[in-house]
Amino acid sequence: MRSGCITCGDQGVPMRIVELHEGEAVCVDQDGASHKVAVELLDTVRPGERILVHAGVAIGAVT
């Protein structure tokens, strides 16, 4: 289990997109916890994709 806060952490956290809303995604982390994530920095995102999240913002795709 990861300790700390996703918003305050110094590292990117891989997450999977569950739902998309205007400029925001609902994602789950490796522990199954749900988070709201801003996705404006990425060109395209789709449910099921894995992204890298830092401070509540998607910063890249995980391939």
Image: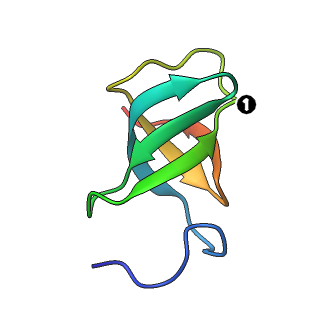
Determine the residue positioned at 70% across, 27% down. 23
Asked if residue 7 is positioned above or below residue 12 in the image, the reply reads: below
Quarter occupied by the C terminus: top left
Quarter occupied by the N terminus: bottom left
Residue 5: give x, y in percent of width and height.
55, 76
* Element at label 1: loop
Q: State how the image is colored.
A: rainbow
Give neighbour class at mark 1: few <14, some 14-19, many 20+ (Cα, 10 Å): few
Q: Which residue is mark 1?
A: 41
Between 24 and 16, which is closer to the camera in this rendering?
Answer: 24
Determine the residue positioned at 44% across, 18% down. 46
Determine the residue positioned at 52% across, 20% down. 45
Residue 28: give x, y in percent of width and height.
36, 49
Total number of numbered discs in the rendering: 1
Q: Quadrant of residue 30?
A: bottom left
Say which amino acid is labelled 1: Leu
Q: Residue furthest bottom?
A: 3
Residue 39: give x, y in percent of width and height.
65, 32
Asked if residue 46 is positioned above or below residue 41 in the image, the reply reads: above
Q: Is residue 34 left or right of residue 36?
A: left
